[in-house]
Amino acid sequence: MDCITQNRDNFNAGTYLGSGKVADLKTAVTVHHAGWVILEHEVTPSQARNLEKETGARVMDRTALILEIFHRHARSRAAKAQVEIVRLGYMAPRLRELGAGRDRQRGGIGAKGAGESGLELDRRKIRDRIAELNEQLESLQEEQNTQRARRQSLHRVALVGYTNAGKSTLMRALTASDVYVADKLFATLDTTVRSLQPETRPRILVSDTVGFINKLPHGLVAAFKSTLDEALEASLLVQVIDAADPAFERQLAVTAEVLGEIVPARFPASWCSTRSIAPTTMRPGGCARAGPRR
């Protein structure tokens, strides 16, 4: 594994990287026998194709990598549908570079006519599939709205924060539940709601929401806004941070930016660290819980 960085005013229109960095990348791929090249930024389909030709390795940009992680971790019907919609939208303009449908003609049942190209048919299938998934999501959204309506009279606390900050671990501690916990990005894609334990009067519900990340693809933000509705309707937001992470202040800023798109500016909020931190770094309204993050 190797890491190559580049500082330049403009990205190369053909390969994203400059010719010198492309040569360095090709050397690194050869030395490490790498099969994949992961790019920090999003690239155009033609740039990815040109880099693959130059390096002989598959190229995946930041958006594709995040979508792959979401795809692997989606468990519920809603999460799977939301992720598939975004993946199909990402794939549609890249069909030509992927080689789908080039120099092919199809006809028969389901095609517009005998002369419809494979590329046109593939794009139409994607549009039809997205429409079908949106219909499924509308039905699932109605069910979720009904469930939230039943909880309106209860006090609700939503745990929000950067991905892998320890929200699910804190959720377990607060609710004595067996919610899924893993030390990896986006382990939780669905909102989980449990009662605070020991149970209080009045009853308090705690919800664990999907985590955020810097430069989260806009399609995913839009897709998971329905999941984050639980945060919008909560009585209190608890922003969970991993204070042992050197980048925790930047992560706080990213979380605040994403939340700013879905919740009112004057929403009641506090923050909580999932690791013990030095007293000098504590801020008013914060709480610290010692112990490892999982």
Image: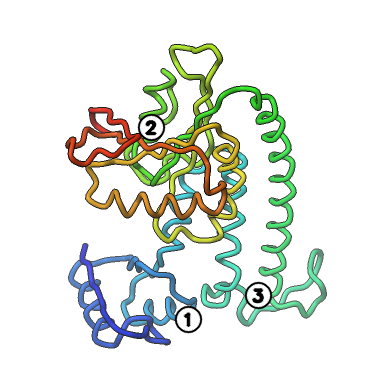
**Residue 228, x across and y down, in percent:** 56, 43
Numbered label attached to residue 119:
3
Instruction: Tell me which residue sits at (62%, 48%) in the image.
Output: 81
Q: Which residue is identified by label 1?
A: 46
Quadrant housing residue 7: bottom left
Q: Amino acid at mark 1?
A: Ser
Look at 60% across and 22% down and name the residue there. Answer: 154
Q: CA distance from mark 1 to mark 2?
A: 39 Å
Looking at the figure, which quarter contains the C terminus? top left
Give the percent coordinates (x, y) of residue 244.
22, 42
Earlier in the chain: of badge 2 and badge 3, it is: 3
Cβ atoms at labels 1 and 3 below 8 Å apart: no
CB contact under 8 Å: marks 2 and 3: no
Residue at image mark 2: 181
SS at badge 1: helix
Where's residue 48, x and y in %? 42, 76
